[in-house]
């Protein structure tokens, strides 16, 4: 009989073979901090308008070249549990604000780096976490006093352009003015009178060829498809949308038909045709000019559609059907019936256009009631257009936030240095050990102007010194780093119109401190043995945007 070998006493005794456990400062806390520091360091070089691009090849060998933190993290598939917490915090920022994902990662990394120095001095993790939370509380108190710009009328395109420029500039430096025009036009044109602005109502269609300067905003929707029939143009058209194929309907129950003579056979097939013709004639008589189908359009149906001069468009995605129905204000019908006037949609112009060698179907609505706008992006490569799409996405999310809260803070690192100045003064008033953590929190905020400067090839320490000097006076609260100068120099952000969204900073600080304190409070890492065999299958996502 095999001799059973007793396990070592302690936690190993409790867990299965192959389980690993790390505990204490050296094994758990410092390990977590160094992983997060490395991760934040990677992201830091992608921060700001001059941030470096990362080339990422994901698990299915798709290549990305981008400096957008959200995309980098989504495609990296981070394994380390502590770094994963920071990724999750930045994903929350993305869901809440839609911008400022890199802010969360860089700040959380800087806070953990500062915490490591305090731990080596003998301060406990609990005291550091308490100090960070106090500093956060104070920061959120100070933030509203730093607001330098407020936008009240967000239907005014020129005012919207002023504030969106900085967000787009951080992704596409040099193209910001042109992209800013596109985003501002698109967002303001579909802003509803009541209710909230929906980001999903700004669609993006990427068409290869030409250059970025040929991009445009279409009020309505654009699809990279060709029409089914011969009719390629309709004006002031009533539109009917079916989610089913337009074809001879198969009956739900199976039946047998007994045909005894040639006449009966002829009558049977012509009866089927007659039924289909009568259905399409009824649709045409209702004033419809365009039929949109969610499935295939049969040959016989196509013949009758051409006969009655109806334009036929096929859309495979049910999401596209829903969006189009919202755009033209129609009801999606599940089977072929004669639509009532309430179920029909309306569009000023439905036509085929050729952009480069791509044929598109455009549903254009020039009137006031257009609910969806499409930005058509042109560019030489797919990677380039993907990057432009991310910049536009940031701009649209910024617009969504400013419709909720129109407050803006000074950009270019001015807000962070002002917070650091005031937090350092606040740390001097604290009696306990938390004051060290609060002071380190203030130092961690310096990482932003430093990163902006270093990514632009300027000495970061010199810039931080200049900014502190400027912020010591009452009039210097809005002084930030001048990214366009050759040497290390500062600029007044209100005059240069460099504004950061208040919401982005507010939530960014909250999520970054939350992630950093959670990681600091971990004192043991216990990992079960990995299950053998293939990885579990991922749940299939929606068929949208695939």
Image: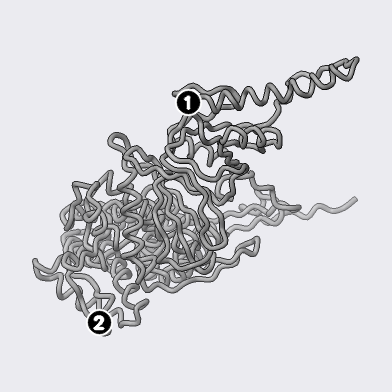
The picture quadrant where one finds residue 232 is top right
Kindly state the secondary structure of the residue where label 1 is placed: helix
Which residue is at the far left? 474
Does any portion of residue 335 appear in the rendered image? no
Classify mark 2: residues with Cα within 10 Å, few (<14), some (14-19) or many (20+).
Answer: many
**Camera-side residue: 489 or 520?**
489
Q: Which residue is mark 1?
A: 343
Does any portion of residue 61 appear in the rendered image? yes
124 on left or right of 523: left
- Where does residue 119 sit, x and y in percent of width and height? 38, 66
Q: Earlier in the sequence, mark 1 or mark 2?
A: 1
- Where does residue 246 sit, x and y in percent of width and height? 64, 32
- Where does residue 135 sit, x and y in percent of width and height? 26, 57
> Which residue: 42% across, 37% down?
236
> In whole angstroms, how far apart are the C-alphas of marks 1 and 2?
63 Å
> Which residue: 57% across, 23% down?
282
**Camera-side residue: 196 or 248?**
248
Q: Which residue is mark 2?
A: 488
- Where does residue 275 sit, x and y in percent of width and height? 68, 21
Q: Confirm or deny contact between disc 1 and disc 2 (CB under 8 A).
A: no
Which residue is at the far bottom? 487
* Relative to 533, residue 335 above or below: above
499 on left or right of 306: left
């Amino acid at each position: 009989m095999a001799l059973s070998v007793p396990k070592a006493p302690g936690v190993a005794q409790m867990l299965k073979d192959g389980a690993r456990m790390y505990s204490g400062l050296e094994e758990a806390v410092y390990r977590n901090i160094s992983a997060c520091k490395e991760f934040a360091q990677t992201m830091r070089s992608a921060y700001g308008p001059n941030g470096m691009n990362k080339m990422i090849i994901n698990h299915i060998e798709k290549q990305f070249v981008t400096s957008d933190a959200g995309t980098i993290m989504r495609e990296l598939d981070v394994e380390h549990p502590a770094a994963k917490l920071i990724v999750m915090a930045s994903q929350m920022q993305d869901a809440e604000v839609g911008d400022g994902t890199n802010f969360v990662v860089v700040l959380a990394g800087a806070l953990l780096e500062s915490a490591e120095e305090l731990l080596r001095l003998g301060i406990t993790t609990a005291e550091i976490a308490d100090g960070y939370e106090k500093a956060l509380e104070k920061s959120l108190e100070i933030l509203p006093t730093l607001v330098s710009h407020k936008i009240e009328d967000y239907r005014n395109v020129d005012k919207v352009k002023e504030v969106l420029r900085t967000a787009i500039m951080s992704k596409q430096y040099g193209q910001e003015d042109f992209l800013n025009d596109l985003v501002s036009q698109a967002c303001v044109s579909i802003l509803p009178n009541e209710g909230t602005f929906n980001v999903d109502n700004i669609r993006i269609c990427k068409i290869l060829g030409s250059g970025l300067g040929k991009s445009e905003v279409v009020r309505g929707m654009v699809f990279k498809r060709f029409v089914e029939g011969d009719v390629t143009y309709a004006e002031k058209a009533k539109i009917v949308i079916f989610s089913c194929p337009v074809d001879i309907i198969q009956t739900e129950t199976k039946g047998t038909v007994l045909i005894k003579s040639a006449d009966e056979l002829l009558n049977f097939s012509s009866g089927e045709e007659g039924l289909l013709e009568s259905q399409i004639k009824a649709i045409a008589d209702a004033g419809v000019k365009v039929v949109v189908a969610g499935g295939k359009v049969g040959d016989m149906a196509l013949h009758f559609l051409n006969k009655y001069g109806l334009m036929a468009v096929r859309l495979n995605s049910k999401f596209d059907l829903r969006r189009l129905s919202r755009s033209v204000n129609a009801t999606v019908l599940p089977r072929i019936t004669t639509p009532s006037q309430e179920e029909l949609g309306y569009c000023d112009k439905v036509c085929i256009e050729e952009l480069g060698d791509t044929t598109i179907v455009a549903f254009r609505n020039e009137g006031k009631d257009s609910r969806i706008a499409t930005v058509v992006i042109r560019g030489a490569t797919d990677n380039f257009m993907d990057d432009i799409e991310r910049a536009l996405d940031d701009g649209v999310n910024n617009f969504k936030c400013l419709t909720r809260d129109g407050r803006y803070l000074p950009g270019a690192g001015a807000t962070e240095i002002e917070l650091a100045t005031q937090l350092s003064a606040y740390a001097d008033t604290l009696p306990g050990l938390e004051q060290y953590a609060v002071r380190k929190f203030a130092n961690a905020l310096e990482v932003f102007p430093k990163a902006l400067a270093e990514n632009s090839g300027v000495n970061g320490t010199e810039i931080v010194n200049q900014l502190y000097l400027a912020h010591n006076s009452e009039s210097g609260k809005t002084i930030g780093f001048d990214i366009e100068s050759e040497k290390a120099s500062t600029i007044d952000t209100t005059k240069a119109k460099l504004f950061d969204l208040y919401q982005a900073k507010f939530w960014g600080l909250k999520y970054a401190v939350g992630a950093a304190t959670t990681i600091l409070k971990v004192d043991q890492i216990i990992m079960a043995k990995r299950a053998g065999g293939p990885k579990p299958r991922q749940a299939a996502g929606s068929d949208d945007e695939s």
